[in-house]
Amino acid sequence: MNIGLIGCGNISDQYLTNLPRLPGINVRACADLVMERAKARALEYNIPEHLEVDELLERKDIELVVNLTIPKAHGEISTRILNAGKHAYSEKPLAIHRSDGAKILESANNMKMMAGCAPDTFLGAGIQTCRNLIDKGAIGEPIAATAFMANHGHEHWHPDPGFYYEVGGGPMLDMGPYYLTALINLLGPINSVSGMTRKTFEERTITSESLIGTKIDVEIPTHVAASLRFVNGAIGTIITSFDIWGSQLPRIEIYGTEGSISVPDPNTFEGPVLIQMGYEDNWKPIDLTHPIGGRGLGVADMVAAIKGSRRPRADISLAYHVLDVMEAIHESSNQKIHISIESLCRQPPPIKPEWVEGDFTE
């Protein structure tokens, strides 16, 4: 399938490295608001054409477009892709507001096009191995989960980090999709949340080389904590923060009636996966049951879903549910109330252990 790519910024490197090696995918063209950036990516990755955004959307030979623009543009660009009669796959988050996500859903339904969204890290070896353990009953009935993303922001490494501290940024919208998507893949959808947030620093200073010394005004909460109740009855705790210098907290843990699983970083596709049973003192490493994978697996699964007339695993209903949960966490904090989640999604189907990397044919 011929695909196009809109947005040639930092994350595009990972997609353009991995997409060409996945079956059924031909990267035909790329576009960016800054044409020089699109031209540079086309030369670097041997992409046949670099185009204006409107030109790419008018191309009849491009069936699917990957949206790698900045978060606050995700809603508009994905809607334009769908209204142009093309399937859309977006980098996370789906949009920065629930209402924008709803417009994408509406466009996908009206145009009878498929829409999907990152993260696709839950399709990788680490989290699929954990899913396999849970589905087999290795730790009994899941009763609780914890998820922690704690760092001091992105201004020390990102070449242009200002958008992380604008409306549409912040630790929950930036990193929450990795953690919430992993939890939903492992435990199913969420039906209620209670959140608390704060903004610790009114101003941040960029220390990455290109803009070193530049000041950023912080517009959004930078420490977000929440309790989650899953439809299956499990209770979760999540913290996402740009205010923490150091932490020894685990990324994700799942607790069952018979044992616990240590889940690897959901921003990666790898391990390690550890399990602890009953009164045992030691955590035991578990061999990964699936190929590791990389950025673009969600696109490959979507291509196979289009050809096979099925729903992709990283589909829009999952991404919208994650967006709904994240917005509800902030609303809960602002309004000082417990909030029920109105959206619902399916728990994505697991990948069989004998899966060949990138081949999602079913």
Image (cartoon, rainbow, N blue to C red):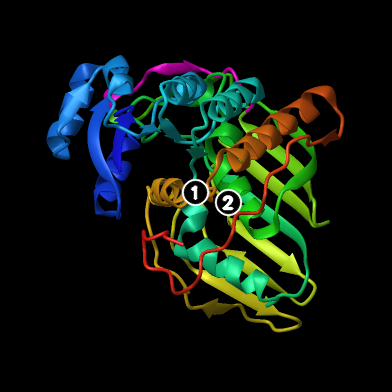
- Relative to 291, does residue 312 appear above or below in the rendering? above
The label number, if any, that marks residue 130 in the structure image: none
Q: CA distance from mark 2 to mark 1?
A: 45 Å
Question: What secondary structure is found at the residue carrying circle 2?
Answer: loop
Q: Amino acid at mark 1?
A: Ser
Vertically, is 78 above or below 295? above
Residue 281 on image: x %, y %: 68, 82
Q: Secondary structure at mark 1?
A: loop
Q: Position of residue 180 (x, y in %)?
A: 63, 46
Q: Amino acid at mark 2?
A: Ser
* The one of 31 and 332 positioned closer to us in this rendering: 31
Residue 163 shows in the view: no
Question: Looking at the rendered structure, which numbered label has been put on residue 247?
Answer: 2
How many dots with numbers?
Answer: 2
Q: Please give the residue where the numbered disc 1 appears in the rendered image.
A: 309
Q: Is residue 105 above or below residue 183?
A: above
Which mark sits nearer the N-terminus, 2 or 1? 2
Q: Nearer the viewer, residue 44 or 273?
A: 44
**Residue at image x 52%, y 55%?**
122
Image position, residue 254 (x, y; %): 68, 63
Bounds of the magenta segment: 210-221
Whether residue 119 is visible here, answered yes or no, is yes
Q: In the picture, which quadrant includes the N terminus?
A: top left
Against 51, is 272 above or below?
A: below
